[in-house]
Image: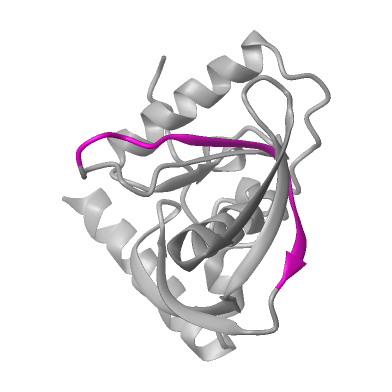
């Protein structure tokens, strides 16, 4: 396993649309292991492959990385097959948009289908943080950042904050 560099906005690779995984094999499982390692090293709870520069429809998450036992989840070729009419607003952040947190409105409940580590089709009904995180990570597969859900003004402010933080980091 290896910790890989996580791309940060406005890197254009984050806007790429990820390709469907054709075969679940050891190479893909190695990619997933690297993704988990990278996510844990960055203190995140979710990561899409595109965030480490791999345009494949793969994402990982662990909603309890610091609370006792880890609960790693791998989603290959995930797709949402149902959403509730009810919406929920949650404060979201992103490893590719460090130190920026904003409220985002999304469907409160979803049903998703995906392949697991062995290539078997799974169905998941999700609500709360799991639903929010899954939708957030699946957006990455379409080249969408959580900032894209904000008003033009809020997105502009967030991107300026991000650029300023990057400049400060580079100048030490």
Can the viewer see residue 83? yes
The vertical placement of 61 against 138, above or below, is above
Give the side of residue 157 with respect to residue 139, left or right. left
The vertical placement of 40 against 44, above or below, is above
Give the side of residue 118 with respect to residue 8, left or right. right
Can the viewer see residue 143? no
Q: In this view of the protein, which residue sits in the foreground, 65 or 7? A: 65
The vertical placement of 94 against 160, above or below, is above
Give the side of residue 4 with respect to residue 148, left or right. left
Q: Position of residue 45 (x, y in %)?
A: 38, 48
Q: Is residue 137 magenta?
A: no
Q: Can you tell which quarter of the image residue 65 is in?
A: top left
Q: In this view of the protein, which residue sits in the foreground, 33 or 128? A: 128
Q: Position of residue 120 (x, y in %)?
A: 73, 27
Identity of the residue furthest to the top in this view: 26
Numbered range of the magenta stretch: 68-83
Q: Position of residue 18 (x, y in %)?
A: 74, 42
Q: Main secondary structure of the magenta part?
A: strand
């Amino acid at each position: 396993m290896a910790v890989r560099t996580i791309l940060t906005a406005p890197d254009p690779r984050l806007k790429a649309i990820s390709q469907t995984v054709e075969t679940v094999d050891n190479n893909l499982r190695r990619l997933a292991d690297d993704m988990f390692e990278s996510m844990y090293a960055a203190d995140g709870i979710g990561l899409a492959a595109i965030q480490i520069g791999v345009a494949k429809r793969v994402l990982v998450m662990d909603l309890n990385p610091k609370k006792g036992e880890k609960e790693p989840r791998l989603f290959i070729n995930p797709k949402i097959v149902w959403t509730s009419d009810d919406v929920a607003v949650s404060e979201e952040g992103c490893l590719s948009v460090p130190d920026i947190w904003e409220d985002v409105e999304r469907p409160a409940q979803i049903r998703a289908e995906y392949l697991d580590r062995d290539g078997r089709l799974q169905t998941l009904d999700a609500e709360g943080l799991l639903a929010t995180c899954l939708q957030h990570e699946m957006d990455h597969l379409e080249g969408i950042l959580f900032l894209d859900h904000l008003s033009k003004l809020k997105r502009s402010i967030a991107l300026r904050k991000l650029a300023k933080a990057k400049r400060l980091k580079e100048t030490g």
